[in-house]
Image (cartoon, grey):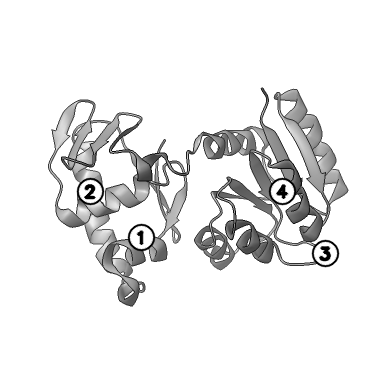
Amino acid sequence: MSAVVLVVDDERSIRRFLRVSLEAAGYEMLEAASGRKGLSMAVAHHPDIVVLDLGLPDMSGFVVLERLREWSDLPVLVLTVQDREEDKVRALDLGADDYVTKPFGIQEFLARMRAALRRSPSAASSEARFTVGPLEVDRETRQVKVQGQEIRLSVTEYALLLALARRAGRVVTHRALLQEVWGPNVTEHVEYLRVYMGQLRKKLKAAGPELIATEPGIGYRLLA
């Protein structure tokens, strides 16, 4: 069964282009030209993923994202002309899975959409043992393996890895990682994060391929 994609964008030309591209790739597309219409269609049709523009005529895409996240954890891919770093961080902090700026290449867009669709919102948080690519994590024994080789992690490194693994394939912002691992009072201390993330990446990479990608100025992504 093909995945259903809800595109919320007020540009008719973008919706037309995406319909042709998505249907050619085997997806079913629904469309909405406003935020209110997009929210009502998300409730009525339960799409597999939402492609969301931030510059909508009736309300900000940020508001749409906030309202979606009040009741749903379905993947959201932001597609917008707004390319400021603070907009990307805000969207990701609000729960977007990824962020693509216009103009965009359709192959990259489809690849990012596939990655978002592969995300299982509850899998890593509910299972005692889970696998992400060559990475294996056993939460009961706190054992971490890469390509079958056990990796010894500190308490903080392990907490960072779990925070990324729960959102495998998604960008996790600096603020979100700091709040989850160190608490709400150190969300501005990015230097803490860089030090421990560097140690974690070094240990993981010693046993296999690069597993953590940096999104400059925004955060990190565990490669799914």
At x 68% / y 43%, what residue is drawn? Answer: 104
| Sooner in the amino-acid sequence: mark 3 or mark 4 | 4
- Residue 18 visible here: no
- The Cα atoms of the two marked residues, 1 and 4, are separated by 29 Å
Residue at image mark 1:
177
Answer whether labels 3 and 2 touch (C-beta < 8 Å). Answer: no
Q: How many marks?
A: 4
User: Mark 3 or mark 2, which is nearer to you?
Assistant: 3
| Sooner in the amino-acid sequence: mark 1 or mark 4 | 4
Most extreme residue toward the right, as rendered? 12
| Sooner in the amino-acid sequence: mark 2 or mark 4 | 4
* Kind of residue indicated by mark 1: Leu
Residue 217 image position (x, y, % from top left): 44, 61
| Sooner in the amino-acid sequence: mark 3 or mark 2 | 3
Residue 202 image position (x, y, % from top left): 21, 44
* Kind of residue indicated by mark 3: Pro
Most extreme residue toward the bottom, as rendered? 185
Q: Is residue 77 left or right of residue 56?
A: left
- The Cα atoms of the two marked residues, 3 and 4, are separated by 18 Å
* Circle number at residue 200: 2
* Kind of residue indicated by mark 4: Ala
* Kind of residue indicated by mark 2: Leu
Label 1: which secondary element? helix
| Sooner in the amino-acid sequence: mark 1 or mark 2 | 1
Q: Is residue 66 left or right of residue 162?
A: right
Residue at image mark 4:
42
Residue at image mark 3:
57
Answer whether labels 1 and 4 touch (C-beta < 8 Å). Answer: no
- The Cα atoms of the two marked residues, 1 and 2, are separated by 14 Å
| Image quadrant assignment for residue 61 | bottom right
Label 2: which secondary element? helix
